[in-house]
Amino acid sequence: MARNDFQGSLDLLVLKTLAQRGKLHGYGIALHIQKASDDLLRVEEGSLYPALHRMEQSRWISSEWALTETNRNAKYYRLTATGRKQLQEAEESFEQLVKGVRAMLKFA
């Protein structure tokens, strides 16, 4: 498993959000994660924006500036083909992590 830390989990959540919702700005991504998780997961700006920048550098996502529904300028992100491949790998890695944790819980 390549990445099982929080950063890897955040990547998975962001990539999955963009795959499900299409183009979104950072606040929209954070809001979707919060709502989709029934308020169990909250992504802080201090974690989200460095992760978005890193994922853009890795070419998993691309961005463009556009006006929001409230007429504010915001950077919108979308998933790239490389990001779709990374999402698939991240989902598989996460499933292996869950499988391992479940096995440990049964063992104890």
Image (cartoon, helix red, strand yellow):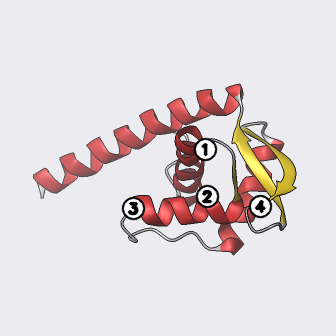
Q: Nearer the viewer, mark 2 or mark 4?
A: 4
Check the image and report above or below for 80 versus 12: above
Determine the secondary structure under disc 2.
helix
Please tell me which of labels 1 and 4 falls first in the chain.
1
Residue at the spot 74% in from the left edge and 48% down from the top edge: 77
Q: How many discs mark residues in the rendered view? A: 4
User: Distance of mark 1 from mark 3, alpha carbons?
Assistant: 15 Å
Residue corresponding to mark 1: 18
Tell whether label 1 touches label 2 (CB within 8 Å). yes
Residue corresponding to mark 4: 68
Residue corresponding to mark 3: 37
Determine the secondary structure under disc 1.
helix
Please state which amino acid type lies under the numbered disc 4: Thr
Please state which amino acid type lies under the numbered disc 2: Ile
Residue 49's spot in the image, x, y percent?
A: 74, 63
User: Distance of mark 2 from mark 4, alpha carbons?
Assistant: 13 Å
Please tell me which of labels 2 and 4 falls first in the chain.
2
Please state which amino acid type lies under the numbered disc 3: Ser
Residue 1's spot in the image, x, y percent?
A: 48, 38
Please tell me which of labels 2 and 1 falls first in the chain.
1
Determine the secondary structure under disc 4.
loop
Please tell me which of labels 4 and 3 falls first in the chain.
3
Tell whether label 3 touches label 4 (CB within 8 Å). no
Say left or right for 102 vs 54. Answer: left
